[in-house]
Image (tube, rainbow, N blue to C red):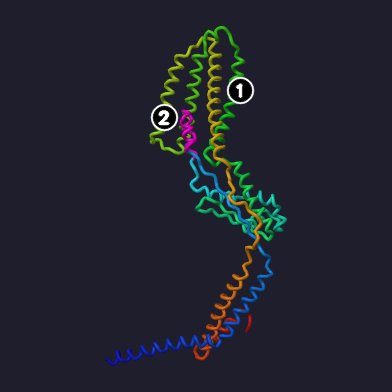
Amino acid sequence: MTANHDNIEARPEQEEDDEISLLDLLQVVADNLRLLVLGPLAAGLLALGYSFTIAPTFTATTKIMIPQQQQGGAAAMLSSLGALGGLAGAASGLKNPGDQYVAFLKSRTVQDALVDRFKLLDLYEVKSREDARKGLEANILVTSGKDGLITIDASDKDPVFAAQLANGNVEELRNFLGRLALTEAQQRRVFFEKQLTNARDNLTKAEQALKASGVNTGALKASPGAAVEGLAKLKAGITAQEIKLASMRGYLTESAPDFKQAQTELAAMRGQMSFAEKAEPTQGGDSDYIARYREFKYHETLFDLFAKQYEMARVDESREGAAIQVVDVAIPPERKAKPKKATIAMTTTLASGFALLLFVFIRQALRGAAQTPETAEKLLRLRGAWGRAIGRK
């Protein structure tokens, strides 16, 4: 009972000590009120005065809209052309086109183009292109919004140059995209352009070989125009089907129904080819002419097929419109973006006030601790160790 009674009496004393500690803190604040009020105000006024010496920076903004993928119509047109209809299947749309265009704007190629265009080595007073790119990154902010628009903010001390820099990003991005194939139609156009070039070269060689073989009476009697032409077209169809299967492996598994159907069609075409080759007439020396004629018709068929695909890809590409559409053209800003004098003054005032308050509490704590002999001795040893550390004896 006596111990419990002592604990009950100790609790009010402890609460009284806590209350006294809080009053002590308030007393410390009251004793240093002039320092805590005038100090932050002086620091804020100094920061405000310094902000007037900072050269103003202007920010110009331009907004662009990235191209939208149009794969539905292209896929429908390709399906009507038979053997090569699956070639564009691998050219899937971009999952995050906005982020990719932001990466293009931040690429070294685009940045180097801007460095050369605006002579940033001299403007930023640097010697290396890497430093110029760092300066460019510090002055340009590129963001992609959920609305599908990309915002380019360019900052500079000259408002006119800030607008030129923002618009220059768009122009250099267009030049960069002109060397790339991003959309489905662009990828198909590039692919068929290469195939068309190869087919044209092979067709020229086959035509020259056919002319060099000559035409004789026996070859005319063989009438290759009916028998060999069909065989050449069948061979060209097999080649096209093989190209289709190769492209389908990039986005389908071998167990997919479309892939199995394409394999079945290829096997059937190869069977027809084998049967036609066995039934092909060969008449001594005339076989050389027939073989060359068949080779010519094969390359001619491939050339016609690739030419149709190439023209259709160009039509699709033109329907997609401009790669980059500008929503807002950057104009010279009328108001400066920074420095924000009020923000600088308020931030400095609050930061200095907090620092002074912390300083006052620490100083009061050290003074209170120095009044205890044990603590005073510890402080004395701490001062001696600190003096030795900085070279004082």
Q: Judging from the image, what secondary structure is the residue with disc 1 in?
A: helix
In what quadrant of the picture does the C terminus appear?
bottom right
In what quadrant of the picture does the N terminus appear?
bottom left
Q: What segment is highlighted magenta in the picture? A: 72-91
Q: Which residue type does callout 1 highlight?
A: Thr
Residue corresponding to mark 1 = 204
Observer-nearest residue: 283 or 168? 168
Is residue 48 left or right of 281 when viewed as pictured? Answer: right
Q: Is residue 49 visible?
A: yes
Please state the horizontal and vertical placement of residue 72, each as a whole percent of the image: 47, 38
Image quarter of residue 349: bottom right
Q: Give the number of callouts.
A: 2
Observer-nearest residue: 5 or 334? 334
Observer-nearest residue: 207 or 372? 207
Residue 152 drawn above or below residue 348: above
Residue 291 drawn above or below residue 367: above
The label on residue 237 is none
The residue lying at 69 percent from left, 69 percent from top is: 53
Is residue 299 left or right of 118 when viewed as pictured? Answer: left
Residue 357 drawn above or below residue 133: below
The residue lying at 52 percent from left, 39 percent from top is: 184
Please state the horizontal and vertical placement of residue 51, each as a whole percent of the image: 65, 70
What is the spatial separation of the Cα atoms under label 1 and label 2, in whole angstroms?
31 Å
Please state the horizontal and vertical placement of residue 281, each as a whole percent of the image: 48, 12
- Tell me which secondary structure the magenta stretch mostly adopts: helix
* In magenta segment, residue 36: no
Please state the horizontal and vertical placement of residue 162, each as a whole percent of the image: 66, 56
Is residue 78 left or right of 345 when viewed as pictured? Answer: left
Residue 13 drawn above or below residue 244: below
The label on residue 263 is 2
